[in-house]
Image (cartoon, grey):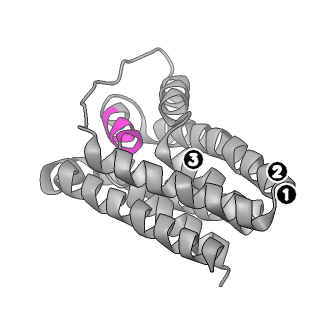
């Protein structure tokens, strides 16, 4: 198995489970058709995170390996601290005429600069294998959006958001520390 693929798959699965993007898919799918919501959300995350991955790969080629590893570890550590210190706010998705377009626009706006885009940027910069990072992220998103669209109500009733947020923050800190140790070692 390919390590960048597994790293990207794991990071996206753990950081997006119960996150606002998945909750938006749940909310939108309660009002619109599931296929349109899934398709719009997937196109959005593939375009937004794909752009981040390409930028990370380009940065990784321009910077020396040690510098890109230090930058990637710094991003993971900063987001881990940010996730653990911030309070999660709630919000309602607004409807539109087209389920696909509403899903695409909402998820696109939510993902620009999001922790997952930054983490896939950092993974792409670290591993310098953007295709494998993208494929891992795309698979993770398709699984999460599928779950969000199909059984999102279950997640909302049975999983506490604070627990998921803490686990995500700790994962970012651990990945940041591992990357830092690799860069310094």
Magenta: main secondary structure equals helix
For the residue labelled by badge 2, is the local secondary structure a helix, a strand or a loop? helix
Left-right relation of 14 to 184: left
The residue at 54%/55% (across/down) is 74
What's the mark number on residue 91?
none
Above or below residue 93? Residue 44 is below
Residue ID for mark 3: 118
First in sequence: mark 2 or mark 3? 2
Label of residue 58 in the image: 2
Residue at image location 47% in from the left, 14% down from the top: 97
Mark 1 → mark 2, Cα distance in angstroms = 5 Å
Magenta span: 20-27
Counting from the top left corner in percent of width and height, residue 170 is at 33, 63
- Do we see residue 8 in this rendering? yes
Where residue 29 appears, as percent x and y from the top left, is 36, 36
Badge 1: residue crowd in 10 Å (few <14, some 14–19, many ≥20): few
Between 4 and 105, the residue placed more toward the observer is: 4
Please give the label number shown on residue 61: 1
Q: Residue furthest right?
A: 62
- Left/right of residue 151 with respect to residue 116 in the rendered view: left
Q: Position of residue 23 (x, y in %)?
A: 33, 41
- Give yes or no for contact between labels 2 and 3 (Cβ–Cβ under 8 Å): no
């Amino acid at each position: 198995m390919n390590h960048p693929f597994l790293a990207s798959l794991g990071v996206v699965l753990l950081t997006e489970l119960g996150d606002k993007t998945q909750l938006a898919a749940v909310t939108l799918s309660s009002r619109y058709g599931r296929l349109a919501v899934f398709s719009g959300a997937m196109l959005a995350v593939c375009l937004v995170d794909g752009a981040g991955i390409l930028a990370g790969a380009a940065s990784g080629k321009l910077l020396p390996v040690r510098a890109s590893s230090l930058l990637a570890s710094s991003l993971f550590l900063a987001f881990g601290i940010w996730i653990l210190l911030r309070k999660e706010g709630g919000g309602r998705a607004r409807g539109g005429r087209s389920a696909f377009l509403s899903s695409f626009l909402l998820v696109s706006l939510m993902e620009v600069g999001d922790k997952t885009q930054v983490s896939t940027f950092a993974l792409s910069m670290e591993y310098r294998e953007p295709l494998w990072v993208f494929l891992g992220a795309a698979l993770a998103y398709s699984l999460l959006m599928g779950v969000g669209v199909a059984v999102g109500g279950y997640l909302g009733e049975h999983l506490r958001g604070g627990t998921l947020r803490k686990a995500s923050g700790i994962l970012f800190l651990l990945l940041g520390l591992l990357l830092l140790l690799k860069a310094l070692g």
